[in-house]
Image: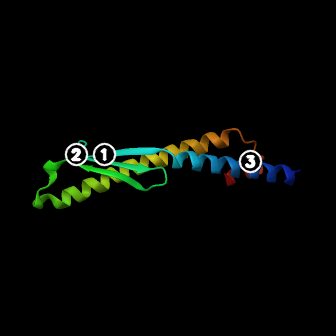
Amino acid sequence: MVDMNKIMQQAQEMQKKFAEVQSERGKKEYHGSAGGEMIKVIIKGTGEMKSLKIDPTLFDKEEVEILEDLILAAFNDAKKKMDDDSQGSLSNMMDGMKIPPGLKGMF
C-alpha cells in the first residue's frame, strides 16, 4: 500500500531540491561559439544573453547572412550547454529519491 504522506513529503523535498538547482543554474554562465570562435556568446543560466563578441573580419556586407547564422549557432551552442547542465543536475537530484515503483514513470 502506498503511504500518501510519504509521497507528499518526497514531493516537497523534490520541489525544494528543484528550486535549489534552478537557483544554482541562474548563477552560472555558459559560453558558446561558432565559426572557429569568430562569434562568441555568453548566456546566463536564466537563458539571457550576457555578451556577444564578433570577429571584425566578418563585417563584410555580402556576408551578413553568414554572420547571422553564426550568431544563431553560437547562441544555440551556449544554450545547449546550459540545458545539458540543467538535465545533469536534475538527474543527480532524482538519484537520492526513493520513488514507489508505480510512480517512477511520472518522474
Is there CB contact under 8 Å for labels 2 and 3?
Answer: no
Would residue 63 be found to the left or right of residue 100 on screen?
left
Name the residue: 70% across, 49% down.
16
Whether residue 54 is visible to the viewer of this picture, yes or no, is: yes
- Inspect the image, locate mark 2, and give the three-letter code of the amino acid beneath it: Met
Q: Is residue 63 left or right of residue 31?
A: left
- Name the residue type under label 3: Glu
For this view, does 15 lie left or right of residue 37? right
Rendered view: 68 above or below 40: below
Q: Residues within 10 Å of mark 2 (few under 14, many from 20)?
A: some
Residue drawn at the location 76% of the way across and 47% of the way down: 101
Q: Position of residue 93 (x, y in %)?
A: 64, 42
Mark 3 secondary-structure assignment: helix
- Write down the residue under mark 1: 33
> Residue at 69% of width from left, 52% of height from top?
15
Q: Which residue is mark 3?
A: 13
- Mark 2 and mark 1 residues within 8 Å of each other at the beta carbon: yes
For label 1, the crowd category at 10 Å Cα-Cα, with few meaning under 14, some 14 to 19 and many 20 or more, is many
Query: Which element carries disc 2, helix, strand or loop?
Result: loop
Gap in angstroms between the C-alphas marked 2 and 3: 44 Å
Amino acid type, callout 1: Ser
2 or 1: tag closer to the N-terminus: 1
- Mark pair 2, 1: CA separation: 7 Å
Label 1 or label 3, whichever comes before in sequence order: 3
Residue named by callout 2: 38
Q: What residue do we see at 23% from left, 42% from top? A: 36
95 or 42: nearer the viewer: 42
